[in-house]
Image (spheres, rainbow, N blue to C red):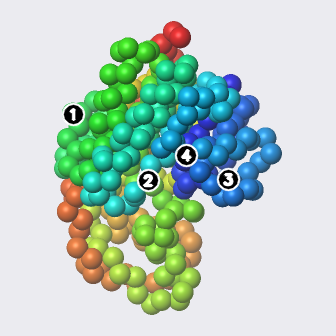
């Protein structure tokens, strides 16, 4: 089985590559900057490609993979930027459509919990999507475009909605690296929000494990949550990280306001993935 991964040099991509290396698959890592993957195992093939400019032979350049895991997406973490639907949405649809029309059998794309918008509480993948920021809107629109594409060109599709991820290699503007950096600098106080918002957090290694398992299972699940299923307050997560790592720093709660683009309490309901899923016969 040959699996190609776009966004391979990104935060999640690197962990997905590491997880895939534990399986008997032929791995193709797709990136705009091969230098970022110079330490990748020799068993994987690195392909330099800008998915914003696909060519007629892009599918062949990737070695005609059996599965494509599409993790690429620019413009984060600015969720309110119009860039998401003005640039990212058409770019990704044209690239993925070209892959499918060239013969790609199975596709797994990562979506986002922001597709649910301001809905609170436990969020099931069967719920109606109501995106309320440009990022969530663009992701949800891409999912719908791919579902319409399936009606004219059948292929296996899994749309994995990601919730809150943390771990090594995360962008420096995120909670975990900011906390770690403050501790490493010897700061006495860590400024944060009130921390009472409930979220669904999952370590990036577990996220990668779930993504790879979904891809290997057959990649025709439709929309599905990639989450822990367990709500935890942001404050509790920070306290947990401090305890697990033996870090000491005082928390300055309430320094930052709560974000206005997400509800105070929401989390995913973890799906029960069937052992056998009907795949589209290609």
Task: Identify the residue at image location x=55%, y=19%.
Answer: 103
Earlier-in-chain disc, 1 versus 3? 3
Earlier-in-chain disc, 4 versus 1? 4
* Residue 9 sits above or below residue 144 on the image: below
Q: How far is disc 1 from disc 3 in space, using C-alphas?
A: 39 Å
The reply, left or right, for residue 72 in relation to residue 78 is right
Q: Which residue is mark 4?
A: 50
Task: Identify the residue at image location x=59%, y=40%.
Answer: 5
Q: Which residue is mark 1?
A: 128
Q: Which residue is mark 2?
A: 74
Callout 2: SS: loop
Q: Mark 2 vs mark 4: give the one in front.
A: 4
The reply, left or right, for residue 243 in relation to residue 114 is right
Q: Which residue is mark 3?
A: 34
Q: How far is disc 2 from disc 4 in space, using C-alphas?
A: 12 Å
Expressed as whole percent of the image width and height from the top left, the position of residue 106 reads 53, 24
Give yes or no for contact between labels 2 and 4 (Cβ–Cβ under 8 Å). Answer: no
Give yes or no for contact between labels 2 and 3 (Cβ–Cβ under 8 Å). Answer: no
Expressed as whole percent of the image width and height from the top left, the position of residue 40 reads 73, 51
Q: How far is disc 4 from disc 1 in space, using C-alphas?
A: 33 Å
Give yes or no for contact between labels 2 and 1 (Cβ–Cβ under 8 Å). Answer: no
Q: Mark 2 vs mark 1: give the one in front.
A: 2
The reply, left or right, for residue 126 in relation to residue 36 is left
Q: How far is disc 2 from disc 1 in space, using C-alphas?
A: 26 Å
């Amino acid at each position: 089985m040959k699996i190609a991964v776009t966004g391979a040099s990104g935060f999640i991509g690197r962990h997905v590559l590491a997880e895939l290396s534990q399986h008997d698959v032929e791995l193709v890592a797709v990136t705009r900057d091969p230098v970022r993957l110079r330490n990748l195992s020799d068993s994987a093939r690195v392909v330099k490609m800008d998915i914003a400019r696909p060519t007629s032979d892009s599918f062949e350049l990737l070695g005609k993979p059996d599965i494509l895991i599409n993790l690429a997406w620019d413009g984060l973490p600015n969720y309110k930027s119009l860039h998401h639907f003005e640039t990212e949405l058409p770019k990704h649809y044209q690239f993925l459509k070209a892959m499918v029309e060239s013969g790609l059998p199975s596709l797994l794309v990562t979506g986002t919990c922001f597709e649910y918008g301001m809905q609170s509480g436990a969020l099931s993948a069967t719920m109606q999507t109501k995106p309320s920021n440009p990022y969530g809107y663009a992701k949800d629109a891409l999912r719908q475009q791919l579902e319409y594409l399936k009606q004219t060109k059948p292929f296996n599709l899994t749309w994995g909605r990601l919730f809150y991820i943390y771990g090594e290699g995360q962008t420096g503007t995120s909670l975990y690296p900011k906390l770690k950096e403050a501790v490493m600098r010897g700061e006495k106080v860590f400024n944060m929000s009130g921390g009472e918002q409930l979220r669904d957090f999952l370590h990036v290694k577990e996220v990668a494990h779930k993504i790879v398992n979904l891809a290997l299972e057959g990649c025709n699940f439709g929309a599905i949550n990639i989450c822990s299923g367990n709500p935890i307050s942001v404050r509790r997560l920070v306290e947990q990280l401090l305890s697990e790592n033996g870090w000491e720093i005082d928390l300055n709660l309430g320094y930052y306001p709560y974000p206005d683009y997400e509800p105070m309490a929401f989390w995913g309901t973890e799906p029960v993935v069937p052992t056998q899923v009907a795949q589209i016969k290609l």
